[in-house]
Image: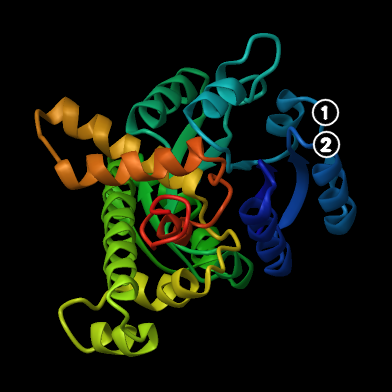
Amino acid sequence: MNQTVAFVGVGRMGANMARRLKDCGYGITAVYDVNREVASSLAAELGCKACDKLAEVSGAADVIFTVVTNDESMRTIFFGSGDNLLANAKGKIFINCATLSPAIHREVHAAAEKAGAHSLEACMASSISHAREGKLYLMLGGDEGVYKQVQSMIEQMSVNRRFIGGPGRAAEVKALVNMVMNINTAGLAEGLGLAAALGHDLAMIREVFSQTGANSRVLETDGGDMCAREHDCWFSAEHAAKDSGIAAGLAKESGLNLPLNSATEAQYKKMVALGLGGLDKSGIAELTFKDRHGNS
């Protein structure tokens, strides 16, 4: 409990992770977000400082969690000219939780080591409520010895976890998780869209799917929302497009052709182009049901 903690990126996931650790007795000393209002509000709630500079964050805590949007944001917070997290970084541990490319995780890991610090991946496969309740599923990557230094903290945040391997390896597995999830989501949307076009009762179809080889976790989480057109965002279509793209990049590097992933990425990119990127990933059904965006 002696380790102090700071957060960079306090949107819904980051903020709830910070709240969880505060509840568990950890000292949250600083938060930072490009949205200053969000950071100030959370800082007031947690009784910590809303930093204006990234270097202040590194100086304020032993362990710094980052939860940012994409590789570009990650590069900015660690390598931005004039102000970045690697200033005041000696002896600090960075735990990077966003779904990013394995390459940027390896880049940050090497730079942190050069600065006398350490960097871990803690890739999340859970929702906002899981973050608040300490029920995340985490895939860890980096140096296992460093992981053991923060293991008790990680255990307070997660119901289960798996140490995958060296730098970038957890990010590879997270890319696989989201690739398969996105393909399943796209497939379910097409199945339900066709069932609707054939005039079937969709509640009956979902029940049949649940008892057969068409069953999936996505059917449970997204099937009803697809039918009801309720796409409140838990995991956005824009993020789905990004993550399928990460998998596509890994496939290209490996010399593999993954046509299902390519088609799924194209569908989510189409959602973004249509202005639907802020919808939940279940909104891909808007492209597959008759008389919706994609099939009018």
When the figure is inspected, residue 28 is found, relative to residue 189, above or below; the finding is above
| Image coords of residue 154 (percent x, y) | 50, 59
Q: In which quarter of the view is residue 36 placed?
A: top right
Name the residue: 43% across, 70% down. Answer: 222
Q: Quadrant of the N terminus?
A: bottom right
Q: Secondary structure at mark 2?
A: helix
Looking at numbered disc 2 in the image, what kind of residue is underneath it? Arg
In the image, 258 versus 225, the foreground residue is: 225
Amino acid type at circle 1 is Asp
Q: Could you say where residue 87 lies in the image, as x and y percent from the top left?
A: 65, 19
Q: Nearer the viewer, residue 82 or 285?
A: 285
- Is residue 129 among what the camera can see? yes
Q: Is residue 54 left or right of residue 160?
A: right
Above or below, 98 against 104 in this view is below
Residue identified by numbered label 1: 52
For residue 36, which numbered disc appears in the image? 2
Query: Which callout, 1 or 2, points to the residue nearer the camera?
Result: 2
Q: Depth check: 138 or 13 in front?
A: 13
